[in-house]
Image (cartoon, rainbow, N blue to C red):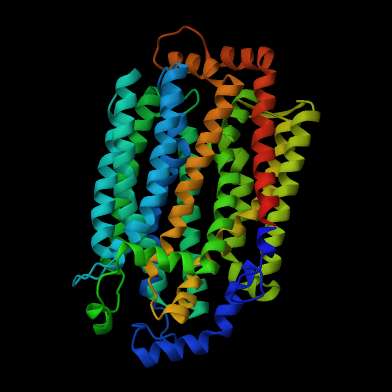
Amino acid sequence: MLLKRDNRFATINILSIKGTIMQEETNVSAVSSAEGANPLQPSEKLSNRNLFMYALGTFGRDFLYNLFNGYLLSFCVFTKNLNTAQFTAITFIIVAARIFDAFNDPIMGGIVENTRTKWGKYKPWQLIGCVTTAGVIITLFCVPAQGWAFIGLLAAMYFLFSITYTMNDISYWGMMPSLTSDPHDRDKLMTFTQIVVGLAGGLCGLVVPTFAMGDHPLGGSATSAFAIMGIFAGVIMVAFQMFTILGVKEKPLSTHLMKTPPMKVKDMFKVLTKNDQLLWSTLVLLLYSTGTGVVNGGLGMMYVYFDNAYNGTLWMLFGIGFAAVSAVFTVFYPAISKKFGRDKLIYSGGISLIIGYALMMIFGLTVPKIHLFSVLGMDFNLRFILMLIANTIAGWSGGFYMIMVINIANTVEYNEYKTGRRDEGLIFALRPFTAKLSSALNQGIVSLVYIVAGVLTYTNRITDIDRKLSSETYEHVIADVQANGQDSIKILLACMCLIPMVFMAITL
């Protein structure tokens, strides 16, 4: 499979890229020193100030991105009454905008690389991007449009988001490899940053389902609750980005770099296509993100609601084990990586995902819903608890993503060794490229499954209740799904389990 493919520069699998780069590190340093091309010597250590200020800067960004990427479809189906044509239009907009967004990333990476200011090449774009993105998100979630008017608003705001967030995202992640070339410091920086990323995603996964959906939303309705979430996300994105923009101390751009002519578009693509290790890492990351994204992109949440109750806390609890195990992996990654090596960790992550989702599907199809206990008005049954445990097992796969991102960062030195240029912004543009392209793919898949499973039939009734247009109750709608929509529930279950298993099997 993909992880066993050899590349033309070294007969190693993709997960050994780090080893190759470390073996060549002496040569890289020698080349950089001789040419004066590397403004940051490998021996220079990462300061605690830069470690904390850089990592803290991503908290608001990632909360906002999780809200937009993970709950936009939920915002649409639970606050808007949509017919099939309108939902199809939303699907087309999301997929088209995210594909545009993905292919915009390498271009933005090139623009960042060509930026020469007294504030550096990263911070100007971080500032412009965070402020404009906040405005876009607040507008989208706060304007109370319905029907085709909402479709038009969504199209405009989505394509604007594709531009504004990319400005911030590319410049933020492009800065990371430039802060240190020391492999141990880079692991430490990535680990701490991923902890903050996980905290932001965890907070979003806690507050959005709990307070924006279900029978007790903020402001009395899902519409009001999502507006509050949009404002909150925009404010904290700008606030936390100030830690990075004002707190990170960069080295001045080198004289060599200032005199280097701007890179042409064709040269940007040459850099990307000639770095085979970068391309294989990107492909593996794309497959992983696409497969796992369908679960958090809507299929998992809708299954939990339909098979249990329309209660956002249940979905939060369903994912808490996965998040906890992923957090443990992230915190202790430097130690366990040193002890076991990356190859073993990455394969253990892939296998845990396959086992976890296989068990989840078996439990969902065979285990009866025997009532076990109730807490705060929520009923917990045997099937739900066993599926939660299976999802917790799959949580070890969270390390897969982290290691592949580190591999992409490490190809900066590999690129420098081969070409004499670092091109951090351009190379790291492929990380958000994979995130956005995989997001386009999994949102397309989720939307197709929703249509096939007849999900809109039930979500439109929930929307009418939320907008006070129906005297039905949420409990009545869910009871109807469980009585007459078992095919819908089984389709959701099969897709949320089989798709990530198949995609992970391909990468292994």
Q: Residue at x 40, y 54 (%)?
A: 59
- Residue at the extreme top of the image, as rendered: 471
Q: How many marks?
A: 0
Left or right of 58 on screen, residue 210:
right
Q: Residue at x 33, y 32 (%)?
A: 155
- Residue at the extreme front of the image, as rendered: 266
Nearer the observer, 107 or 132: 107
Q: Is residue 181 visible?
A: no
Vertical arrangement, residue 398 with respect to residue 447, above or below: below
Q: Residue 267, located in which quarter of the rendered image?
A: bottom left
Which quarter of the image is occupied by the N terminus? bottom right
Q: Position of residue 228 (x, y in %)?
A: 33, 34
Q: Residue at x 52, y 12 (%)?
A: 473
Which quarter of the image is occupied by the C terminus? bottom right
Q: Position of residue 212 (x, y in %)?
A: 44, 31
Q: Position of residue 97 (x, y in %)?
A: 38, 40
Q: Residue 211, located in which quarter of the rendered image?
A: top left
Q: Position of residue 81 (x, y in %)?
A: 42, 17
Nearer the observer, 328 or 259: 259
Vertical arrangement, residue 301 with respect to residue 393, above or below: above
Q: Residue at x 42, y 68 (%)?
A: 271
Vertical arrangement, residue 303 with respect to residue 268, above or below: above
